[in-house]
C-alpha cells in the first residue's frame, strides 16, 4: 500500500462545533489512490464530520491535503460527496437538472444530454431524465444522488451511510454500484457487512479519535 | 409518504396537457382579467362554466376530484359574504363575486393540474429577474412536500404517544418544523457547494 500515491492526507485534524464539543481530536490519516476505506464507530463519534472536513465543507484546525495540496476551491471538482439523506443531495425540479448541476457549476464542457444519459445509465436509471426527484422511491433517490456526483467524474468519493434505509435488494444493488465506481472511496457507515465486504481498510473512530485500523486483505 | 401533488394529472395525455405552458399561462391571465370585467348577468357566465366542464372532461381530470378542490375556496367566500353584508351591498353582489371566484379558481386549478410544475417555472427562467423567481418557486415546490412529510412524521409520533395535537401542540410542531427546515437548508447548501455552486451566483 505504501507504494501507492497518497490521495488524501489528514494532519492533526481537529474540529469543534459551536457548543465547544470536540468532535474530532487530532486525527492523522493517509488514504491512498483508489483505496476503499470505511470509517465505522458509534453514533456521534465524528464519522460524518470527518467526511465533511475532507470535502472542505467545514472549517477545521489542522490540514487536509488532497494530492499534496491543501484544500481549495479548485480541488472541489475532485471530490464527490454522497450525503446520508438523498433529499439533501437532490434539490432541482427534474432528475436531469440534478445530474447536470455539478458539471454546469464546474464548467465542464461537453454534451450535457450525453453526460446525463451516461450518468443515469451507470446507476441503472436510464430514461429517468424527466422524472421529478420527489416522486421517486428512496432507493431511486439514492441512485440519482450518486448519478449527480458521477456526472462530473470526481476522483474521490465520500459516501456517508450509502446503504442506510435501503431494502436488502436495493442495498445489494447499491453496493454493486459502489464497487463499479473507479476512484478513491471513503465510506462512513454502520453497516459492518458493507465495510468488511468492500473496504481494504477499516478505521474505527471513537470519541473523535482513531482507535483502530483494520486491514481486510481485500 | 404519498401526496396528492399539485400537478398530478400533468402526466396524463389530455387536451390541456398537450398545450404549451406559456400559452396556457397567457390564456389563464387573460381569462382572470376577463372575469373581473364580466357584467352582472348570468348569461355571460354560463359559457365559461360550460368550457370548464368540457376542458375537465377532455383533459381526463375526474370531475368529483375537481369539484372537491374548488370547495377549498369556500372559507374565503364566507369572508366576502360577511364583508358584503357589512358594506350594505346587496345579495346580488355576493352572488356575482361568488361566481367570479369560482370561475377563477376553476381555471387556476385546471392550469395547475395539467401543467408540470417544472414547465411552469421555466416560463420565468429566461425572463429578466426570472431566474430568481424560478429558483425560489422550484425550491418551494420541491421542499414543501418534504417539510409536509416531516410535519406528518412528528404529528404521528405525538399521536403514537397518546397526544392528539391541538393548538398548543401545533405551535410546538411549527417551531420544530422551522428548526428542522433551517437545519435541512444548511445541509442542502453543503450539498450544493460540494457540487461547485458558489454563493455569489
Image (cartoon, coloured by chain):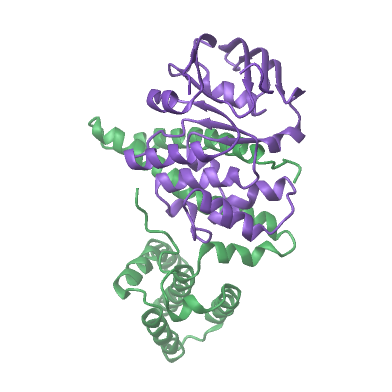
Chain colours: A purple, B green
Name the one closer to the observer, B123 or A6. Answer: A6
Q: Is residue A108 visible?
A: yes
Name the one closer to the observer, B31 or A10. Answer: A10
Left or right, B14 with reference to A53: left
Image quadrant occupied by the N terminus of chain A:
top right
Task: Report the residue at 51% width, 40% height from top.
Answer: A180
User: Compared with residue B19, is residue B177 higher up or lower down, i.e. above or below?
Assistant: above
Task: Report the residue at 57% width, 79% height from top.
Answer: B27
User: Compared with residue B135, is residue B124 higher up or lower down, i.e. above or below?
Assistant: below
Residue A103, horizontal then vertical, whole percent: 68, 48
Q: Is residue B167 visible?
A: no
Q: Residue furthest left?
A: B162
Q: Residue furthest bottom?
A: B43
Residue A172 location, quadrant: top left
Residue A23 location, quadrant: top right
Left or right, B39 with reference to A101: left
Name the one closer to the observer, B172 or B125. Answer: B125
Left or right, B25 with reference to A67: left
Amino acid at each position: 500500500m505504501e507504494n501507492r500515491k497518497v490521495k488524501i492526507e489528514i494532519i492533526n485534524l481537529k474540529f469543534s462545533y459551536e457548543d465547544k464539543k470536540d468532535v474530532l481530536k487530532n486525527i492523522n490519516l493517509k488514504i491512498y489512490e483508489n483505496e476503499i476505506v470505511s470509517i465505522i464507530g458509534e453514533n456521534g463519534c465524528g464519522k460524518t464530520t470527518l467526511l465533511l472536513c475532507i470535502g472542505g465543507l467545514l472549517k477545521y484546525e489542522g490540514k487536509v491535503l488532497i494530492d499534496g495540496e491543501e484544500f481549495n476551491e479548485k480541488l472541489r471538482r475532485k471530490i464527490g460527496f454522497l450525503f446520508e439523506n438523498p433529499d439533501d443531495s437532490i434539490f432541482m425540479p427534474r432528475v436531469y437538472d440534478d445530474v447536470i448541476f455539478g458539471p454546469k457549476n464546474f464548467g465542464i464542457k461537453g454534451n450535457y444530454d450525453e453526460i446525463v444519459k451516461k450518468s443515469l445509465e451507470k446507476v441503472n436509471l436510464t430514461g429517468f431524465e424527466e422524472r421529478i426527484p420527489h416522486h421517486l422511491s428512496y432507493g431511486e433517490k439514492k441512485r440519482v444522488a450518486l448519478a449527480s456526483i458521477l456526472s462530473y467524474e470526481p476522483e474521490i468519493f465520500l459516501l456517508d451511510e450509502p446503504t442506510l434505509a435501503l431494502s436488502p435488494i436495493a442495498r445489494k444493488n447499491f453496493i454493486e454500484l459502489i464497487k463499479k465506481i473507479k476512484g478513491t472511496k471513503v465510506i462512513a457507515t454502520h453497516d459492518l457487512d458493507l465495510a468488511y465486504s468492500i473496504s481494504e481498510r477499516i478505521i474505527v473512530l471513537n470519541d473523535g479519535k482513531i482507535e483502530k485500523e483494520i486491514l481486510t486483505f481485500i | 409518504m404519498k401526496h396528492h401533488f399539485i400537478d398530478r394529472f400533468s402526466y396524463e395525455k389530455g387536451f390541456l396537457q398537450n398545450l404549451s405552458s406559456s400559452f396556457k399561462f397567457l390564456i389563464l391571465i387573460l381569462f382572470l382579467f376577463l372575469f373581473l370585467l364580466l357584467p352582472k348577468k348570468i348569461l355571460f357566465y354560463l359559457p365559461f362554466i360550460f368550457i370548464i366542464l368540457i376542458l375537465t372532461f377532455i383533459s381526463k381530470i375526474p370531475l368529483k376530484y375537481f369539484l372537491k378542490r374548488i370547495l377549498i375556496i369556500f372559507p374565503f367566500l364566507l369572508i366576502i359574504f360577511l364583508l358584503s353584508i357589512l358594506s350594505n351591498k346587496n345579495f346580488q353582489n355576493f352572488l356575482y363575486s361568488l361566481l367570479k371566484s369560482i370561475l377563477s379558481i376553476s381555471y387556476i386549478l385546471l392550469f395547475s393540474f395539467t401543467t408540470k410544475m417544472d414547465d411552469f417555472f421555466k416560463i420565468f427562467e429566461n425572463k429578466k429577474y426570472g431566474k430568481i423567481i424560478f429558483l425560489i418557486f422550484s425550491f418551494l415546490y420541491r421542499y414543501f412536500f418534504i417539510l409536509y412529510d416531516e410535519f406528518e412524521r412528528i404529528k404521528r409520533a405525538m399521536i403514537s404517544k397518546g397526544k392528539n395535537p391541538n393548538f398548543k401542540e401545533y405551535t410546538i410542531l411549527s417551531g420544530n418544523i422551522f428548526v428542522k427546515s433551517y437545519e435541512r437548508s444548511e445541509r442542502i447548501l453543503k450539498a450544493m457547494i460540494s457540487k461547485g455552486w458558489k454563493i455569489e451566483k
